Amino acid sequence: MNFKDTLLNGNEGLFKPASLTPMQKLALRFVVTGILFYGLTALEGMIMRVYQVKPIPTFNSEHYFSLLTAHPLVGIFGSSYSIVFGAFLFLVPFFMKKPLWSIKMGNWTFILVAGGTFVFWFSDFLTHFAPLYTLYWPLPADFTQFNPLSGSFFILGIAIVMVGTLLFVFNIFKTITYTPEGYEKVPGCAMLASATGFSWKESIFRRKSKRRENLVSLPVAAVARGTVDTLLNALIITFTGVLILVYMIAAVMGFNLEHSAIDALLYKNWFWWGLDLIADGLVLIFVAGTWYILATMISGKELYMARIARLALWVELVVSWTVWSHHLLSDQAQPGYLKVVSGELVTAFELITQGLAFFITLITLWSARPLKMTNPLKFLLGGLLGFGLAVPAGIIQADIGLNRILHNTQWIVGPHVHVAILVGLTMTLYSAIYLLLPILTNGAKLYSQKLANFHFWAHLTGGIGMGAFMGMAGLKGMLRRTIYYEGEYRIYMILAGICGALLFLAFLAFLYNIIMTVGIKGVFGIFTPAESDTKELLPENK
Amino acid sequence: MVNSELVLNGQTYAYTIYAIVVILFILGFAYQVTKPGKAGVLKTSLFVVLVVCLTVLGVSLHITTSKTIPWVPMDLNRADIKPDKVFNITVVKHQFQLPSDKLEMKKGDIVVFDVTSNDLTYGFGIFRQNKTMVCQMQVVPGHKNDLMWKFEESGTYTIRSTEYSGPEGHQMILKDVVIVNE
Ligand SMILES: [Cu+2]
């Protein structure tokens, strides 16, 4: 096949969008859109990397901080949420051997998450509303700095994403508990208890001979537990968004509501409680669950210590509800006992739960030795390494003594946040994408293994390198969320910029490889309505 | 003498060594897992040892830092310690308002920076001439933000906001306003 043919029809013309079931299309829509939003996030990241080497004169601080506001939100909601939602809406029915409760609702989740992300990104792009994702009170309601109308559109975009998220949560729990037509009656409540972990005593304390089988398999339990945090988090963000909207709409109508009606510290506590349900909750739980799924699929073996893994997921869920204070270790009015118990001790549990997931995954892989070094295995090991580096970095900053000299430095956002997200989370998601690609596309063949290898090495070294150089600058006092005009940390920022460029090249190689695999016609074919209306996951003749 | 520069250097070495070990471990695993050989399954007892190690690691970090870093006990008990000097600072509209042009003290004095915000959430950080951080805290409106500190070295220090407070916030720098005399 010549280049033009491959570009249009995909590698060897193997990908036929007309053969896709509605479920395959649903999952692929999420994944493709998630990849494109990742590209947007990476591009924003690159502009900021250049700006940190040398501030661009035509590009004022308002520009810079609106980029800084949009960047993490597009990355988390537009990219990570999309890919994860798409994968799990497909995998929960896959593991439960019954159809998704509502494919239509799944498609609405897709439209709302992608559309909402576009709305807040675009309003930010046009108007430079820049309160950062932290939204520290009363900054989002400071109308001497920001226009309340532009802020309203921004918050509206976030709200649309949250509605899509709530539909996802509903769809997942409904799929776990409902009885499809013609199926044997499903014990809904017992399923829910098993999935969320509230029947944990059963599996731990009962004698082996008396123990009942778990109603829900481990991968589904992992998805369900992460989804609990997704729900709680969506409620907190929605509540906070409504509160900010009240101030904005009042201002648009000419009233000025008193900022002091909201206690800034209390607000910071509940908002970080909600945000940590993402960072220390659903991300860690979904990632651990995905590692288990990938490890068992790659090795073809049972998960090592599956019972302990199940318990650890439950502990992780409870831990994620009680760790938020590590973000308030430098708030002097925050009570000391919350700093010590929630901020330090409960947080240290993440080292244990994530460490368990790390070793259980490795031991499971080891039990199938020798394995072929496939793309899914490579990227899975990269993902494990990412969390192996980023979790201890987080434990270090969640320390009263060290936080005093690390808070808001580049250390936090480099070796901890970016290594966790770029190397840990994203490489885990890439592993899942490479693994699911043939299943979701009815046998499309990857265009180039050389490009996949380049994607792997450039992403891994770029991600770790960028985190390392940001971390070094942070330990030398470089702050995040600010601009340096005198070239203060230039050498570190040049090195971090080179690593960032490597990450960006890795993404371009991956994007090109995927487009050449499915073809441009294939990409568009994913977004047209499916020809069959089957509720099955895969075409029947397969 | 333990100051924040020493702690930062110690952390740099400790974490770098850790990172190299983890990277080598995963590389070694990747190499070995593709080699033919017996796939021995790890014994349960060994697995338990692993978990205990993780627990000890997690908890001992905080115990070690609270025993070795001098500003931790001072911070937790600052209500009961009588300072040698208190500096009352106000922040409003992205401006620090100091009680005097320069904040002067003697080396070894226990001082308190009591910072009040009249509008937004800010940060308050003190930096050395070489730009490394001495210490910082958050400045939350409607609350008492007091940072107790003991300077171990004489010299001149810069104040800078360490928290984002809108696009104007990055200019909140007061150069060389803290003076610690011998
Ligand atoms: Cu956190």
Image (cartoon, coloured by chain):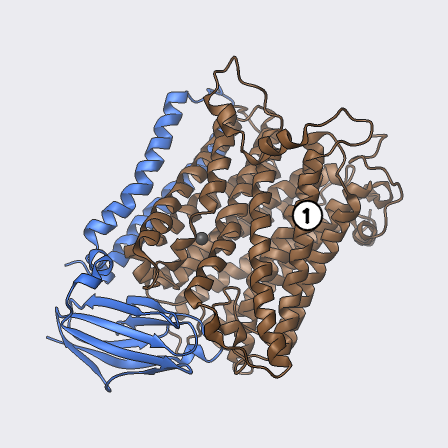
Q: What residue lies at 41% left-to-right and 75% top-to-bottom?
A: A484
**Which residue matches tag 1?**
A168
Image quadrant where residue A257 sits:
bottom right
Q: Residues within 10 Å of mark 1 (few under 14, many from 20)?
A: many
Q: What residue lies at 10% left-to-right and 75% top-to-bottom?
A: B182
Q: What residue lies at 18% left-to-right and 71% top-to-bottom?
A: B111
Q: In the rendered image of this protein, which colour is used for chain B?
A: blue
Query: In the rendered image, what is the letter of the chain coloured brown?
Result: A
Image x and y of residue B66, in percent:
23, 51
Image x and y of residue B49, in percent:
34, 27
In terms of secondary structure, where does tag 1 sit? helix
Image x and y of residue A451, in percent:
64, 48
Query: Where is B2 relative to B106, above or below?
Result: above
Residue B72 horizontal side relative to residue A475, left or right? left
Residue A497 horizontal side relative to residue B122, left or right? right
Q: Amino acid at mark 1?
A: Phe
Along the viewing direction, whichever of A183 and A498 lies nearer the viewer: A183
Q: Say if residue A516 shows up in the picture.
A: yes
**On what subunit does the disc labeled 1 rest?**
A
Q: What residue lies at 27% left-to-right and 56% top-to-bottom?
A: A401
Image x and y of residue A136, in percent:
47, 68
Which residue reaches farthest right? Answer: A531
Which residue reaches farthest left? Answer: B182
Query: Where is A384 relative to A481, above or below?
Result: above
Along the viewing direction, whichever of A413 and B120 lies nearer the viewer: B120
Residue A80 horizontal side relative to residue B156, left or right? right
Along the viewing direction, whichever of A121 and A222 lies nearer the viewer: A222
Residue B57 horizontal side relative to residue A466, left or right? left
